[in-house]
Image (cartoon, helix red, strand yellow):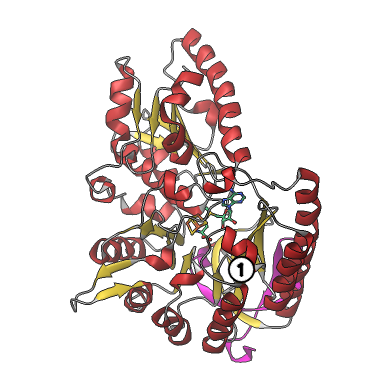
């Protein structure tokens, strides 16, 4: 999960069109927002905008927001306060400066945003961002736009396809959204309200995008969805295809070396998907499978529709199919009614699974969700104490997993220059960052390396002979 990601500037674009308007896109929240920010950049490129990493030089700032926890939403209003001041300074200089709010806060709060912050020019929800160019035109004539409808048209059909050079400049790994929305209605979660019900992109559209990415040099694609493994589409054989079928199909795309997907719900891990983990070497042995809690009582109150034992059995089946798979997860502590004993169940489950990485959060009450109506809210200091204990355990497991990699020869996808000259940063099959001595001209290559050490957030490696693989 990423917080505050600003998009890389496709350098060619910036130099090719020196007089273009510049857009700075600040991305909050999950990978789906990162993908959406890239596509908003595409939509605006057709209007002559280039993306910039420098807010100070932008003519348009978009805040692509997250509503999942209270803190994430609060950040948006404080950022808007700062942008209001920038807008005043720009107005005094006679320069255009527009402000847009997109993403889940836009969807959830719509009109409220322009009421609280009159400096905002456009508010656009996640389903209609292909209409950004028209909204900006309208705002320039003095008509501010709040567009949070669920569009009848398919936004993906209306988004312009980026130029090959632009895609190439974005790097050798890419996200590809295949599914949006959620019908699961976990009682703590706003996603079903902000992103709407589950919708899958059609197979042909996904294959077309995957081919374009690979043609531009992308080696690894991560399929995205709020419930990515609920993806369904009619296959060429007339059968309903599931995510497993899609992965088998994508594994046949020449040049596409690595596949990942996130985020999955345990209820939607079907046999075909588990078989894909068994059969496909390009499907990386890493799975983010949130459980949220280890107590059946709390799982029921959360409406997760699985028990702790069912989750553990599922992991056993996945590990039988792909023994080297590393598990990742999400946890919430302090859901209403969670007792010390319930929390101990969560710690026990974590001990039993052994996670290679994980995200954990204090429960945050979200207005409009069933969880907000529940009594027996857990005091803040208890939540903090539980989160600290859980995170200590998860961090230890992550460090243990990293240490277990030392001495192994693994395939490394070289992604970007490292901080030191002569160093390149790559990704292990288990999504760890790995530093290795290599040439930047090798970026995009997958090379065998031996892991020789661990750092706080990354591993160190040296080039190795392929034959010595562990
Ligand atoms: N669809 C995914 C799933 O079911 O696992 C996750 C979607 S959500 C964007 C990412 C994570 O945020 C969730 O897995 C959960 O751990 C956390 N989350 C969601 N609502 C929350 C809340 N009200 N308070 C704290 N954490 C929350
Ligand atoms: Fe939210 Fe649950 Fe849907 Fe995940 S499955 S997006 S946690 S409602």
Q: Is residue 151 left or right of residue 384?
A: left
Please say whether residue 82 is visible from this viewpoint: yes
Q: Is residue 114 left or right of residue 457?
A: left
Q: Nearer the viewer, residue 92 or 224?
A: 224
Q: Nearer the viewer, residue 151 or 420?
A: 151
Hey, which residue is sitting farthest top in the picture? 92
> What quarter of the picture does the N terminus occupy?
bottom right
Q: Quadrant of residue 307?
A: bottom right
Q: Residue at x 38, y 43 (%)?
A: 126
Say few, some or many: other residues with alpha carbon within 10 Å of mark 1 (under 14 / 14 to 19 / 20 or more): many
Please say whether residue 438 is visible from this viewpoint: no
> What quarter of the picture does the C terminus occupy?
bottom right
Task: Say above or below: 139 vs 167.
Answer: above
Task: Say above or below: 50 vs 160.
Answer: above
- Percent coordinates x, y for residue 136 in the rendering: 33, 26
Q: Quadrant of residue 289?
A: bottom right
Task: Say above or below: 72 vs 440.
Answer: above
Q: Which residues are magenta?
A: 441-470
Q: Residue at x 61, y 80 (%)?
A: 410
Quickly name the residue at label 1: 328
Task: Say above or below: 398 vs 112.
Answer: below
Q: Is residue 386 left or right of residue 367?
A: right
Q: Residue at x 38, y 77 (%)?
A: 244
- Percent coordinates x, y for residue 250 in the rendering: 34, 74
- Percent coordinates x, y for residue 286 in the rendering: 56, 73
458 drawn magenta = yes
Ligand 1 has an atom within 8 Å of the beta carbon of the residue at disc 1: no
Q: Secondary structure at mark 1?
A: strand
Q: Is residue 70 left or right of residue 169?
A: right
- Percent coordinates x, y for residue 242 in the rendering: 34, 73
Badge count: 1
């Amino acid at each position: 999960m990423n917080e505050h990601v600003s998009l890389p500037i496709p350098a060619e674009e910036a130099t090719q069109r020196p007089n273009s308007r510049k857009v700075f896109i600040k991305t909050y929240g999950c990978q789906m927002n990162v993908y959406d920010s890239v596509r908003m950049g595409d939509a605006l490129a057709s209007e002559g905008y280039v993306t910039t990493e420098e807010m100070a030089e932008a003519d348009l700032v978009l805040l692509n927001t997250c509503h999942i926890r209270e803190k994430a939403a609060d950040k948006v209003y404080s950022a808007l306060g700062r942008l209001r001041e920038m807008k005043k300074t720009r107005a005094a200089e006679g320069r255009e400066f527009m402000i847009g709010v997109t993403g889940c806060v836009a969807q959830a709060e719509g009109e409220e945003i322009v009421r609280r912050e009159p400096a905002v020019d456009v508010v656009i929800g996640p389903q209609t961002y292909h209409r950004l160019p028209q909204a900006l035109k309208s705002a320039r004539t003095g008509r501010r736009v709040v567009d949070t409808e669920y569009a009848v048209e398919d936004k993906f059909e209306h988004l312009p396809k980026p130029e090959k050079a632009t895609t190439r400049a974005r790097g050798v790994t890419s996200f590809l959204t295949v599914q949006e929305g959620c019908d699961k209605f976990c009682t703590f979660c706003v996603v079903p309200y902000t992103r709407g019900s589950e919708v899958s992109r059609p197979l042909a559209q996904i294959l077309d995008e995957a081919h374009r990415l690979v043609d531009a040099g992308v080696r690894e694609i991560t399929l995205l969805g709020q419930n990515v493994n609920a993806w369904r589409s009619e296959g060429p054989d007339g059968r309903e295809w599931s995510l497993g079928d899609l992965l088998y199909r994508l594994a046949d795309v020449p040049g596409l070396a690595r596949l990942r997907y996130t985020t999955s719900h345990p209820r939607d891990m079907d046999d075909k998907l588990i078989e894909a983990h068994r059969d496909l070497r390009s499907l990386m042995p890493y799975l983010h499978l949130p459980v949220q809690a280890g107590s059946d009582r709390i799982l029921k109150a959360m409406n997760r529709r699985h028990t702790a034992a069912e989750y553990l059995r599922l992991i056993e089946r996945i590990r039988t199919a792909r023994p080297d798979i590393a598990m990742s997860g999400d946890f919430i502590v302090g859901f209403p009614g969670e007792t010390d004993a319930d929390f101990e169940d969560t710690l026990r489950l974590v001990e039993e699974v052994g996670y290679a990485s994980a995200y954990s959060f204090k429960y945050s009450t979200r207005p409009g969700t069933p969880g907000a109506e529940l009594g027996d809210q857990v005091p803040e200091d208890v939540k903090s104490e539980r989160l600290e204990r859980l995170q200590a355990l998860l961090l230890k497991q992550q460090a243990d997993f990293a240490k277990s990699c030392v001495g192994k020869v693994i395939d490394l996808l070289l992604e970007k220059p490292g901080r030191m000259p002569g160093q390149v940063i790559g990704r292990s099959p288990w999504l760890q960052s790995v530093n290795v001595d290599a040439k930047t001209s090798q970026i995009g290559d997958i090379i065998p390396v031996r892991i020789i050490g661990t750092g706080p957030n990354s591993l160190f490696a040296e080039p190795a002979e392929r034959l010595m693989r562990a």
